[in-house]
Image: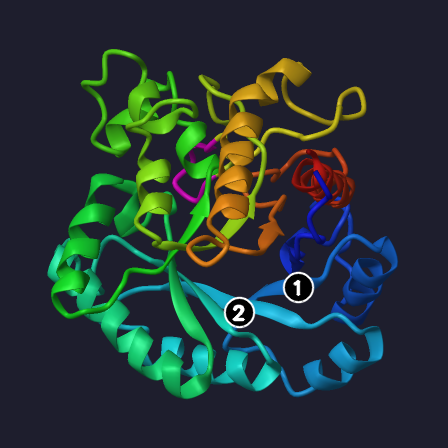
Amino acid sequence: MTPSKALPIGINLDGVLIHDGLPSPDTPTRLRWVRDAGVFDYIEKNIDPDEDFSPYRYWIAEHGIPVGVFGGIFCAGRDEALMRWGMRTGGELGARLFNIQLFARHADGHELSDREVADWFLDAMEHGATAGCLPAMEVHVDMWSERFHRVEAVGELLARSNVSLRLTLDHSHLVFKIDTPEELLASGLQNAADGGRAQLAPGLPGTLYRQWLARGWVVHAHTRSVATGLPGNAAMQRSNGRPGRAIQYPFIEPAPGSFHRNWEVQALTTWKTAVNEMLDWMKAHPTHAPQQISCEFIPFPDYGGGGRYDIWQNNIACARWLQEEWQRC
C-alpha cells in the first residue's frame, strides 16, 4: 500500500512551554518553537478577551505557522457576545474552525437543557457561517457534554432543524474515566458493571465515540494521552481544593521525580488503541471524519499542572507518533 499523504497536525499554543514551574515563553517565541520543531502544521488558540490579537497577523506571517483553530470556554447567558467576537476574530486570523467548551450550567445557575445547548449551537453556526469559522462543540469534562449520552440527544434535536452536530473528539476525556468510580458517576455511568468499558473503551461496537464518528459528527480532534483507573493529579489542586483530574499521562517517560507517580508505557495502550481506531476511520471516511488533529498536552490542574516533565517534548513526540501511525500500511 502506498503511504497516505501527511496528516495535518496542530498544537494548542498553551502546550508550547516546558512546564508551569518555569516562565512561559511569549507568543513570538512559542511560534518560533512550533516552526522549528518541524512537526506541526498549525496552532490552536484559546481566546482571551483581554489579549491584543492585532500583532498575530504579523507573527503568523513571520513564522509561517497559521492559526488553524480558534476557540474558548463559554457560559450561556453571559458569553454569547464573547463567542461571536471570538468567531469573527478567528475568521479574520484565518481559522476555519472554532472549538467551543460550553459549561453545563447557565449564568443564572440552572442546568442547561438539551434544547438550550442546541440553540447555542444554532446561534454559533449562524455567526460562524458569516465569519467563515464554523463551531465544533468539544466533548469535555465540566461541560454539558460530560454527561456523554446528552450528545446524542442534542444531535437529534439539531437534526430536526436539518443541522448536523459538529463535535471535537478528545479521547482523553472519555478513556481516563474507565475503572474510576467517581469519574463514571460524573458522566452518569455509575451503574456500568464493566468499569465503563462498553461505552468508553476501544474495540467494542457500542463505544460512544465510534457512534459519533459513524454519524459524521466529529469534525475535529485533540490528542492527549491518559491512563485508566488512576486517581487525580496529586501535583496540583483545583480551585475547590481538590486534586486535579487525571486527564494527562505523559506520552514519553518522564525524568525521575518529574511526575507524581510511577510511569509505565503499558498504561498508554487503551488510549493509543482508541486513537488508532479514529485514524483508521479517518482514512476510510475522508469526507465524514476529521482530517486534522491538534496535540494538546498542557499544564493546568486537570492535566500536567504541577508536574515537572517536559510538556513541549510530549507534544512533539505525540505528533511524530500520529504521523507514523497515519503512514502505516
Q: From where the camera sits, is residue 127 visible?
A: yes
Q: From where the camera sits, is residue 302 visible?
A: no
Q: Which mark is residue 70?
A: 2
Q: State the CA–CA distance, disc 1 to disc 2.
A: 9 Å
Local SS, label 2 = strand
Q: Is residue 263 above or below residue 75?
A: above
In the rendered image, residue 137, in percent from the top left (x then y), is placed at: 36, 58
Residue at 38% from the left image edge and 75% from the top image edge: 83
Question: For the C terminus, which image quadrant?
Answer: top right
Query: Type of residue at label 2?
Result: Phe
Q: Is residue 239 magenta?
A: yes
Q: Which stretch did the figure color magenta?
A: 238-245
In the rendered image, residue 259, in percent from the top left (x then y), is placed at: 68, 25
Residue at 13% from the left image edge and 59% from the top image edge: 157
Q: Is residue 40 above or below residue 54?
A: above
Majority secondary structure of magenta residues:
loop
Determine which quarter of the picture holds residue 205: top left
Front residue (pair 41, 74):
41
Dot 1, crowdedness within 10 Å: few (<14), some or many (≥20)? many
Q: Is residue 169 magenta?
A: no
15 with respect to 103 (left or right): right
102 with respect to 52 (left or right): left
Count every numbered label the image shows and give the total: 2
